[in-house]
């Protein structure tokens, strides 16, 4: 088996009883105290996530001449400096090579944050689509910490000279923490007030120690998955793949069909012809949760498959997303999620599963 | 004395009845337990057969019969509060079986052997 990457915080996490799993080539904590407890820290207080596995690319060059604006679905030219935006790297068929966030550092400088599992293909694809300018993969130089929860601002503000109240949603600043460079953005994958910090490994260790010493609880990928799914946020590899378009993934609100980029023509055509399948949110009628790849049945007919599922500690039921055939699916009727152990009853739900604060 | 099988069930014998649960090790691997399906009372089960299953926030797993016999009791408290298993799994029984073959007990692992086995995983 391939050697897994370790984040700079590996030893500190082991000392806090982290249970690790291999995730996208990285040896990452899935939990510390337990997924339900950690989910609660984030929803009610504040939680600290190590997301150093994420990839960071840096682009420098003339945005217009480089053609990077047609390489991704995000209108980078229109994005103001100091803002970041979520979007997609698509293939010609409109399938998703990756979902990503572009940070406009300067008029001619970008940071592009990608999924660990897709970093290699993303880098190759972006490089091939850029005409001028330089693209550097600096993923291994960067650690990343997500501080998420209603008390995240209170927790972090004493470590920064800047006023975190002035940092609006999907905005960022490049500042200092412990005298070291830190890019902090008001973003996250939990639905709570939260911040993401891009720093080097040494700084990450200092921040980790300081926050743990302040009583902040660490949370792993298990809690992160339940938190993101409660908000209906997509996970690459589950809800988004090269075979699934953003329209099928019900992410049309992140897609502008009026400007041109790779994959746009296919999406326009798909929109015009209508969707054959769409991702729908569901809730089970019990504490049972489905798993990825469970089959969806309605009226004894297979009409789709589960892409993501988890137990929601807030709702006390299973929740998830399933790709269903639009021609077969009756959203008024219950349906069954099946695997070899039998069947779990579910109903269509609306997103987010829990109220946004 | 409690014994274990390699599927992480524990067995405690009282007279001709086996009291069965899941090991602390297995529960720790599964994490927060959310759902438990129990075998049916009066069903005949065979050693090695999947007779129930357990779900956690992380995974779903079969529960295998560590012995053969007739299911005489199930712990119905666990249907509503399966999280009891997260507290002290080796003191929370799941179901009881009237043994049909006492000799099967000989092939189970004692506590030390099970601990050694778990260390190899």
Image: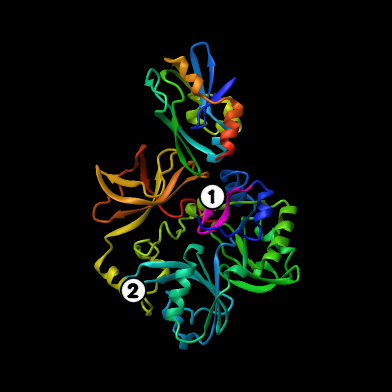
Which callout, 1 or 2, points at the residue further toward the start of the chain? 2
A307 or A267, which is in the foreground?
A307
Please tell me whether residue B33 is drawn above or below residue A194 in the rendered image. above
Q: Residue at x 50, y 19 (%)?
A: B105
Q: Residue at x 73, y 57 (%)?
A: A209
Q: Quadrant of the C terminus of chain A?
A: bottom right
Question: Is residue A168 left or right of B53 when viewed as pictured?
Answer: right
Evaluate whether residue B80 shows in this view: yes
A123 or A186, which is in the foreground?
A123
Please tell me whether residue B84 is drawn above or below residue A350 in the rendered image. above
Question: Is residue A280 left or right of A300 when viewed as pictured?
Answer: right
How many residues crowd mark 1 within 10 Å: few (<14), some (14–19), many (20+)?
A: many
Q: Residue at x 56, y 45 (%)?
A: A35
Residue A92, which numbered label?
2
- Find the magenta span and give its range: A18-31
Residue contact between numbered discs 1 and 2, judged by CB atoms under 8 Å: no
Q: Position of residue A303 (x, y in %)?
A: 27, 50
Residue A355 sits inside the magenta stretch: no
Residue A222, which numbered label?
1
Q: Position of residue A223 (x, y in %)?
A: 55, 50
């Amino acid at each position: 088996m391939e050697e897994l990457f370790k984040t700079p915080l590996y030893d500190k996490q082991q000392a806090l009883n982290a249970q690790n799993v291999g995730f996208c080539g990285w040896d990452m904590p899935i939990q510390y105290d337990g997924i339900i407890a950690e989910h609660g820290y984030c929803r009610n207080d504040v939680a600290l996530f190590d997301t150093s596995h994420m990839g960071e690319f840096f682009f420098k060059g003339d945005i217009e001449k480089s053609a990077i604006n047609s390489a991704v679905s995000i209108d980078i030219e229109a994005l103001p400096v100091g803002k970041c935006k979520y979007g997609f790297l698509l293939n010609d068929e409109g399938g998703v090579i990756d979902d990503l966030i572009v940070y406009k550092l300067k008029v001619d400088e970008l940071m592009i944050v990608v999924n660990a599992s897709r970093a290699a293909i993303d880098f190759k694809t972006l490089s091939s689509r850029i005409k001028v300018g330089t693209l550097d993969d600096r993923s291994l130089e960067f650690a990343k910490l997500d501080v998420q929860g209603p008390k995240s601002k209170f927790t972090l503000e004493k470590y920064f000279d800047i006023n975190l109240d002035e940092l609006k949603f999907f905005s960022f600043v490049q500042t200092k923490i412990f005298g070291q460079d830190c890019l902090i953005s008001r973003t996250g994958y939990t639905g709570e007030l939260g911040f993401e910090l891009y720093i080097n490994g040494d700084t990450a260790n200092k921040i980790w120690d300081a926050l743990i010493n302040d009583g902040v609880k660490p949370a792993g990928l298990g809690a992160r998955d339940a938190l993101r799914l409660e908000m209906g946020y997509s996970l690459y590899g589950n809800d988004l793949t090269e075979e699934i378009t953003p329209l099928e993934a019900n992410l049309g609100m992140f897609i502008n069909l009026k400007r041109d980029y790779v994959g746009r023509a296919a999406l326009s055509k798909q929109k015009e012809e209508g969707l054959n399948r769409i991702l729908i949110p569901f809730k089970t009628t019990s504490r049972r949760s489905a798993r990825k790849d469970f089959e969806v049945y309605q009226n004894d007919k297979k009409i789709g498959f589960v892409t993501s599922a988890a137990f929601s500690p807030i709702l006390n039921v299973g929740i998830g997303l399933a790709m269903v055939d639009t021609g077969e699916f009756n959203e008024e009727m219950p349906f069954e999620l099946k695997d070899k152990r039998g069947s779990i009853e579910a109903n269509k739900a609306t997103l987010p599963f829990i109220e946004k604060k | 004395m409690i014994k274990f099988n390699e599927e992480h069930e524990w067995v405690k014998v009282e007279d001709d009845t086996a009291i069965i649960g899941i090991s602390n090790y297995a529960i720790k691997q599964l994490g927060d337990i959310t759902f438990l399906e129990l075998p049916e009372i009066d069903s005949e089960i065979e050693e090695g057969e999947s007779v129930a299953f357990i779900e956690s926030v992380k995974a779903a797993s079969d529960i295998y019969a560590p012995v053969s016999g007739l299911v005489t009791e199930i712990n119905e408290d666990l249907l509503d509060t399966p999280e009891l298993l997260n507290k002290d799994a080796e003191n929370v029984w799941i179901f009881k079986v009237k043994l049909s073959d006492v000799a099967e007990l000989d092939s189970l692992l004692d506590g030390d052997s099970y601990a050694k086995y778990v260390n190899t995983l």
